[in-house]
Amino acid sequence: MEFDAVLLPARRARMVAQGLWHDRTINDDLDACVAVCPDKLALTALQVESGALQRFTYREMARMADRIAVGLSRLGVGRNDVVACQLPNWWQFTLTYLACSRIGAVMNPLMHIFRERELSFMLQHGEAKVLIAPRTFRGFDFEAMAAGLQPQLPGLEHVVLVGGAGANSFEALLSGPEWENAPDAREILTRSRPGPDDVTQLIYTSGTTGEPKGVMHSANSVMANIIPYARRLQLGADDVVLMASPMAHQTGFMYGLMMPIMLRASVVLQDIWEPRQAIALVRQEGATFTMASTPFLTDLARTVAETGEGLPTLRTFLCAGAPIPGPLVEQARAALGAKVVSAWGMTENGAVTLTRLDDSDERSFNTDGCPLPGVEIKVVDVDGQDLAVGEAGRLLLRACSNFGGYLRRPHLNATDAEDWLDTGDLGYLDARGYLRITGRSKDVIIRGGENIPVVEIESLLYRHPAIAMAAIVAYPDERLGERACAVVVPKPGQSIDLRAIQDFLKAQKVAIQYIPERLIVRDAIPSTPSGKIQKFKLREMLLADPA
């Protein structure tokens, strides 16, 4: 695979000179952990449905990473080959990334909620050579789905399944045989180790184009974010991170997979969000920090209040993905006793703004924090002119952690000659330089921290034989932050209901989380004279009629 991460070389000299790029990779950090604290508990992974619990010390983790790396090489995986990983928060996810890093392969994390429609595009566009997925998870047959997809993807040479027996199992091909002891293992593990500017991650994000975009990151770009992030949150080797947010998102990948290793800390993975189980894990493992979206915080605070089971070790809950309601901060502080930190970020950069630990609680529900070191932000009008404090406009950022570009989509990079990235979001800055996101110019709904690709779903609705016009807009939800509402105009003589729309989209193999949960049928949809749908009027309508 040839990667066109064109945004990285131009800023390398400046980033290194400013001490913002550290010229190290996850290999360096894992090797350091083995040298300094080999027998420290590194990773604990719980599978909620089965109750299976797996633990690794740093010595054991490095050995398994080497084993899987040699196993991948036996499958023909080498430098710059893409390994797609559609796993929940299982230990195999973490170890697969570490193994890829050993041999210079590139990890492509994929959400386990993705189905044929999303996967067929991402696997083909990213030229994945190997797909690693569960055999089954939460009642869904991933093996059957992969078998149906593979004939359409000539570049996908192998499907490796976690769980159960079989010649194509993760256990048989990668984690079972002691590949690390093979005569050629040392040469395999050293000949293609990536450098800090090589692409290490290809992760897809949805935007306004209707097609997912492949975000490319190097070790330098992601570590330039993780290091100041951990410093602001005062995290170190004595911390235990609970990660229930999916590692196929940047939240889980950067701060649940990479950060603990970089800090020589410990991480606890939870694959299915269940607040009572999370409470048990925090108490059992002594978790001190976690990061997740608003629904996780709501559930955890409510369950602690109901059960009376306190979380004495949990110091910080970083909440991102949607504004945090003020009452929730108060409830969480009372129930959990932890500091609630608000944040805003992007797949393209990781966390960009965070509140500080010594900020008042009010800052966490009135702002999205202030920039991390190495990040600049500004708010401009439609002509690119800076706006005054308190004036909302387009949010631009310039950051040491900015991505390398979109794979084969350089025209969408939205980064100018001075390295300013147009985030597609709207916001304003207060007098202290704290950011408040006020809206999104890009047409994406965030449901429980999961971006819904609105344009793609609308395009599918237009294919329904009973629909003449369709628009999808967000409506507020106490737990998830937002849900999707479809506003449709039926064709003459036709009728439509919510169940018909949901069944239609399911038949198109759309992820369940992307399917609208409310329907409004109208005779017309408000539009501009040029025919562009005025979604702000639809949102106002939903706010006026929340039922």
Image (cartoon, rainbow, N blue to C red):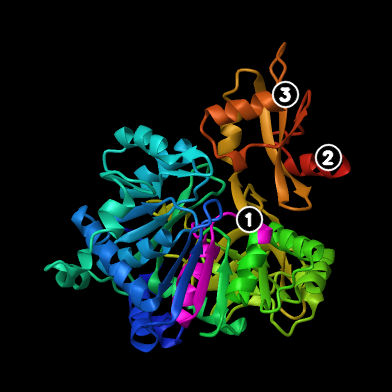
Q: Amino acid at mark 3?
A: Asp
159 sits to left or right of 326: left
Real-space Cα separation, disc 3 to disc 1, in angstroms = 27 Å
Mark number displayed over residue 523: none
Q: Does label 3 or label 1 sit earlier along the sequence? A: 1
In the rendering, at what x and y percent does residue 36 appear? 37, 88
**Tag 2 residue:** 541
Residue at (49, 76) in percent of width and height: 260
Mark number displayed over residue 449: 1
Real-space Cα separation, disc 1 to disc 2, in angstroms = 24 Å
Q: Element under label 2? A: helix
Residue 516 appears anywhere in the view: yes
Real-space Cα separation, disc 2 to disc 3, in angstroms = 19 Å
Q: Amino acid at mark 2?
A: Met
Residue at (57, 83) in percent of width and height: 235
Q: If the image is split into quadrants, where does the N terminus sit? A: bottom left
> For mark 1, does the 10 Å Cα neighbourhood hold few (<14), some (14 to 19), or many (20 or more) residues?
many
Q: Does label 2 or label 3 sit earlier along the sequence? A: 3
529 sits to left or right of 334: left
33 drawn magenta: no
Mark number displayed over residue 497: 3
Q: Which residues are magenta?
A: 247-276
